[in-house]
Amino acid sequence: MRVRILGIVAVIATAAAVAVAALASTSANGLPSYTTGYAKWPKVNRKPFTKCGPPCAHSGVKNVYTSERKVGPKYPNGTVVVKTVAQPGEKTTPLPNQVAVMRKVAGKWRYVEYVLSGSRYTVLGQGSFCASCHARARANDYVFTKR
């Protein structure tokens, strides 16, 4: 009986480890794999915008992409929102210098902001740091950019 229970626990632990690894996988440039191809997703803004705030956490030239369109007033679970930020006057590069990502999981948004460091992105901020600001956009499902 103990061996059977240990076997079941081992299977569950292995499945959990695989799930965590799948959620944490990143692309070659350091962004999460679930953002791959974001530039081909529908763009929320018609043209890049430069106005910032208040609040103003992402100053620069911005574009916002969504993996899914809103269903009524809300985005469905699984939606990923990517905001790219380039600084005015910088030479255009293939990669924006900042990328802010929102991902809706179980009805709640998860936030991570990345900054370009060389040719890879690293985490600049995440979690409650971002959520506290996005609370101001509650009426638009916590997304500042409207369509």
Image (spheres, rainbow, N blue to C red):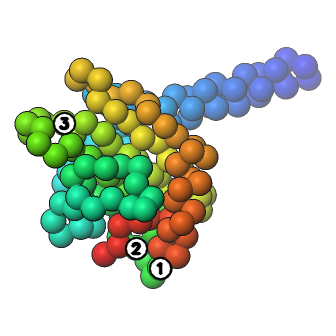
Q: Residue at x 22, y 61 (%)?
A: 49
Q: Which is more toward the observer, 12 or 24? A: 24
Q: Which is more toward the observer, 114 or 132? A: 132
Q: Residue at x 39, y 27 (%)?
A: 122
Position of residue 5 in the picture relative to residue 38 (left or right): right
Few, some or many C-alpha atoms within 10 Å of disc 2 (few <14, some 14-19, many ≥20)? few
**Is disc 1 placed on a helix, strand or loop?**
loop
Q: Quadrant of the C terminus?
A: bottom left
Q: Which residue is mark 2?
A: 70
- The vertical placement of 19 against 74, above or below, is above
| Image location (x, y in percent) of residue 31 | 35, 34
Whether residue 18 is visible: yes
> Is label 3 or label 2 in front?
3
* Marks 3 and 2, how far apart at CA: 27 Å
- The vertical placement of 32 against 103, above or below, is above
CB atoms at circles 2 and 1 under 8 Å apart?
yes
